[in-house]
Amino acid sequence: MHPLTRDHLHTGIQAALHAWRDLAGDAANLLEELLLVQLERASMSSSPTTRRLATNQVLMQGLDILKQQNPVGADILSLRFMDEETVLMVARKLDLSEDQVKRRQREAITDLTGVIWEQETAVRQQRAHQLQAQLMPADYTHLFGIEASSQQLLTHLQQSASPWVIAVVGIGGIGKTALADQVTRQIIPHFIYEQVIWVQVDPAESHPPDETYAQLLAQLAEKLNLRLSPQATGEQRHNQLRQMLKSSPYLIVIDNLESGADVAFMVDRLNDLANPSKFLLTSRVRPPVSASVLSLALAEMPLADSATFIRHQAQTIGLPDLAAAPPEELQRIYEVTGGNPLAIKLVVGLTAVYPLPRILADLKEARSQEIEQLYRRIYWQAWHSLSPHSQTLLEMMPMTAAIGATPEQLQAMSQLDESKLWSAIGELVNRSLLELRGNAWERRYTIHRLTESFLYTEIIHWPEGR
């Protein structure tokens, strides 16, 4: 479904009025793209008669409102299309000329369009809000350097055809989750999908692929309100979900599917669940070449986008000198971070404490190695730059769920008094070690997957996959 326009709706309502008694109809004169019509159909049995009845019911509800605003116009539409009277018959009945009937009919259709437009807009806004509530609050305000990838992914998700499983792949911190979130929010107002479901694979837990898949099925069943018997076998659960996902198009986003074994195990099973539903995966692991999945590799930002992002991030956390730095200084950061968004954020955060030349000199050696080694060096620099109460709070963060924790929960976990808690939150946010979710009225705080990994292995010394 495309975003609705008033002109398009006006044309559709004209067609629907003329087809009032046409049981067969077509998508246009049945107003099938309207959520109002879809909601009416959902309360009826499926048949050609009820398809037209649902459309006519929406028109009648609009006419009831129109009668209060334009009673003569509402009467003309009712006589012309419901009672099938001619213009001449209506003119005589209402003591009008034929030209007056024609003019008032046109005006009434325009007015009826306005009424139904307002009703449909309200329903769409409510529906979009419900779908967006399935997502985690966004932890970004703007994404840089992903326009081409975003458009490519959006195009694939808008098509009611293969690929049914799409994987966004790339190194840690490259922005896979942010891209998936942004495109999912863009697709919602098109109302292509019955529901949008976001599930996360817990990166702190390590299970055999079949157990990971079983947990995924359980999460999906819960979010889809599908009641499965506790005694149901894995195959039975798969088949029940399959029936639902085959009946209507759903968009299922599976975030943090990091194990290569999990990816290889799941692809065929997800394809069996798909069509018309689609699955969007984020993973550091590219699926096997033989798998029926479209892989979109997310590359690091080029220099121009990286420079823009550095200036934006510096301005955001109150570093005007860095925000106004000459291009050659920003290029030095780019040469070390390689255009990786998370690495850039962490390095920019460090400049609040250390001089930039010292930071970059320490990281040059690490950059020639694996990206994980670069992160390790950055995180160690960040850790040593923190005050003791900020270290205390950060150590507690792996205990929070993916959706994050409120300030009250953070205080309970860290046992910091209120002044030290807020000082720690501010410091960690400025270092890009805490991610913000929620809105101005309710804030939640969480950490990036790689920050969690660093804390587990380097600070807390808990093995990942504990």
Image (cartoon, rainbow, N blue to C red):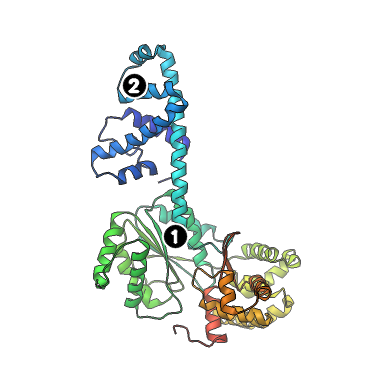
Horizontal and vertical percent position of residue 276 = 32, 56
Closer-to-camera residue (232/204): 232
**SS for callout 1:** loop
**SS for callout 2:** helix
- Which quadrant would residue 385 be assigned to in this image? bottom right
* Residue lying at 31% horizontally and 43% vertically, measured from the top left: 41
Query: Looking at the image, is 422 positioned above or below residue 13?
Result: below
- Which comes before the other along the chain, label 1 or label 2? 2
- Judged from this view, the residue extending furthest toward the bottom is 461
* Residue lying at 65% horizontally and 78% vertically, measured from the top left: 390
Residue 422 got which mark?
A: none
Q: Is residue 367 visible?
A: no
**In the rendered image, which residue does mark 1 sit on?**
134
**Marks 1/2: CA–CA distance:** 45 Å
Does the CB distance between marks 1 and 2 fall below 8 Å? no
Horizontal and vertical percent position of residue 383 = 64, 81
Q: Is residue 429 visible?
A: yes
Quadrant position of the C terminus in the picture: bottom left
Q: Amino acid at mark 1?
A: Gln
- Which quadrant would residue 355 be assigned to in this image? bottom right
Horizontal and vertical percent position of residue 321 = 76, 67
- Judged from this view, the residue extending furthest toward the right is 321
In the picture provided, is 65 more to the left or to the right than 318? left
Residue 79 got which mark?
A: 2
Query: Looking at the image, is 304 positioned above or below residue 208?
Result: above
- Which quadrant would residue 168 be assigned to in this image? bottom left
Q: Amino acid at mark 2?
A: Leu
